[in-house]
Amino acid sequence: MRGADLALFNTTSTKPEIPRLVSEQEYPYRPDVNLLNTMTDRRIEHMQRLQKAYVDSSLAIAIDDEMWNGLRTNDKIDNSYHRQHYMYGGRCALKLMINALVAADVPAPNAILDFPSGHGRVMRFLHTAFPNAELFAGDTNESGIAFCQQQWGAKPILSKPDLREVQFDRKFDLIWCGSLATHLDSAKVIDLLDLLTNALSADGILGITTCGRGAIWTQNNMFSFIEGDRFDRAMKQYAISGLGYVDYSWTQAYGMTWIHPHWMVNYIAGRDDLTVLSFSEKGWHGAQDVWFIIKRPLSHWYDFNRD
């Protein structure tokens, strides 16, 4: 055996040096257990709300619900699938909102806006999860907001095509905006973001969906949101600015929008009163990206007892 190998077996036993430690008496610290317990209880409560909403939410669907009728037209499958698909959209939205509330470590919201609400695909789950909250249904669809009022007690807010003309007379703790920025040009997307972020209370949360890489893949590999030539025009804009928009063939000033994450980040970067809470690529319906933005300024600092 060589000398180098013998050295492996000829080690001497020595006691390791006792490490020197900072004195806990001189520099004492323990987190506030009461605050930690409150945070834990709050998270458990949020998850219990989600569980209840999954089981107990209303299955009522209005016969003139545009989303419902669109699914029935596009999905050539049995009727049970239509209802499953419809309810999934609302249930998934609530799960995302619950995750955002947990991440932000905030209590249950007192005032919630669903914008656009349609006929309550999401509202029904909000109603069950937050029975003590004031619910608001905002949409240009008068039948939709009337249905939300009748079924779930939501206060109707009739919106307008020009979002710069929309005014809210209060602030909201939670706003859900599913599939609206996905249909507007860049100027209108900015109007929408301005409207909703300015309507947030302190520590209020906006959840808003956009179409990005997932929706591009869907267009190219599964089904078409829009005709190929129009899609190509939108993609050219998308490549240049990060936002590509084109009208639908059957209307004007309403179409399909693809937004790159850097476009959204650039918008938020211009607002020191906002913070990105989370970004979930393809988080809604397996195609739309989901942003959660909190009305928490850059000056917000950590808390030793909570964080």
Image (cartoon, grey):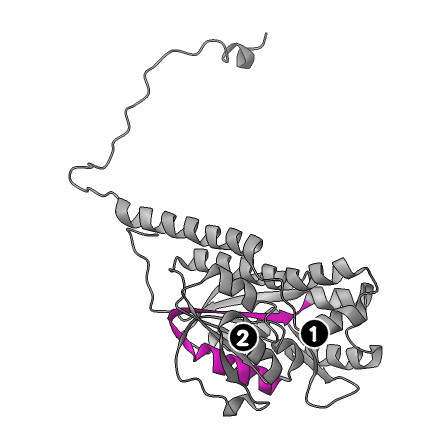
Name which residue type carries label 1: Ile
Regarding residue 226, the answer to whether it shows in the image is yes
Residue 173, located in which quarter of the rendered image?
bottom left
Query: What residue sits right under mark 2 in the picture?
Result: 150
Q: Position of residue 284 (x, y in %)?
A: 63, 63
Regarding residue 141, the answer to whether it shows in the image is no
In the rendering, which numbered label is found on residue 43?
none
- Please give the range of residues in magenta: 186-212
Query: What residue sits right under mark 1 in the picture?
Result: 63
Q: Residues within 10 Å of mark 1 (few under 14, many from 20)?
A: few
- Residue at point 61%, 77% (across, down): 181
Q: Is-magenta flag for residue 95?
A: no
Label 2, label 1: how many angstroms apart (C-alpha)? 14 Å
- Residue at point 37%, 48% (across, down): 41
Q: Tell which residue pokes out farthest to the left in this image.
A: 26
**Is residue 125 shown left or right of residue 44?**
right
